[in-house]
Image (cartoon, rainbow, N blue to C red):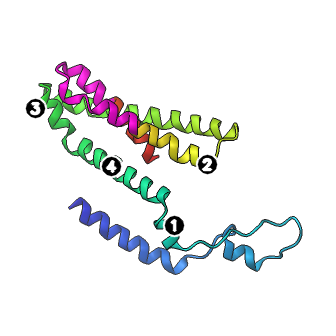
Amino acid sequence: MAIVALSVLGLVWMVCWIPGFKEGPFTSKAVKGADTAVGSAPTEPSVSWRKIFFTRTFASCAFMIIVVYALTTVVLTWLPSYFELGLGYSALQAGSMFALPSIVGLVLMISSGTVTDRLRGRGYTSRVVRIIVPAIGVLICGAVLVFLPSIGTPILAVAVVSIGYGFGAIASR
């Protein structure tokens, strides 16, 4: 029911938004109509959507974010049951610990934002900052979570899930 409700709300939002949509002041269409005097902002090159969708960067980022959102879906759907039935915590404990992965994710998202801001300040390219850093987070996420089935200590399993999910969340910021 939640998916249906969000779909309907999204459709309502789209119907309300489209009639009032206009190009912003920094788009290439708006800049082309302005004076092109010396010192004015250069126009952005026109790139087709097809060219964007078929780049390796877009394809790899789309694949990466699909994997991260699949993990998010699993965490949001099954994590309390895993804590309760798989690790032996009570329902109250499992419900309380359900927040831990999100808290770790929040801390790591903020931290990664600080790291990427500093990297940009030091002259690193946008590609490194916006693609390589999140990809490293997802790789750490996978490297940590691959050991989850072999962990027998419940509190260590909770820590591994929290750290793994947290590093994966870097890509979704």
Query: Which corner quadrant of the image does residue 12 belong to?
Result: bottom left
Q: Position of residue 20 (x, y in %)?
A: 54, 77
Q: What element carries label 4?
A: helix
Rounded to the nearest angstrom, the CA distance separating label 4 from label 2 is 22 Å
Q: Which residue is drawn at 19% across and 36% down?
A: 80
Q: Which residue is drawn at 43% across and 54% down?
A: 60
CB under 8 Å between callouts 4 and 3? no
Q: Mark 4 points at which residue?
A: 67
Q: Is residue 28 visible?
A: yes
Queried whether the magenta region covers residue 151, the answer comes back as: yes
The residue segment tinted magenta is: 139-162
The numbered mark, 4 or 2, whose residue comes first in the sequence reads: 4
Would you call the spot at circle 4 few (<14 residues within 10 Å), some (14-19), or many (20 or more)?
some
Q: Where is residue 139 in the image (x, y as percent from the top left)?
A: 39, 37
- Mark 3 residue type: Leu
CB under 8 Å between callouts 1 and 2? no
- Mark 1 residue type: Ile
The numbered mark, 4 or 3, whose residue comes first in the sequence reads: 4
The numbered mark, 4 or 1, whose residue comes first in the sequence reads: 1
Rounded to the nearest angstrom, the CA distance separating label 4 from label 3 is 25 Å
Of the two numbered discs 4 and 3 in the rendering, the one whose residue sits closer to the viewer = 4
Queried whether the magenta region covers residue 124, the answer comes back as: no
Location of residue 138 with respect to 150 vertically, above or below: below
Q: Mark 1 points at which residue?
A: 52
Q: Position of residue 98 (x, y in %)?
A: 26, 34
Q: Is mark 2 on a helix, strand or loop?
A: helix
Would you call the spot at circle 1 few (<14 residues within 10 Å), some (14-19), or many (20 or more)?
few
Residue 58 placement, left or right of 90: right
Of the two numbered discs 4 and 1 in the rendering, the one whose residue sits closer to the viewer = 1
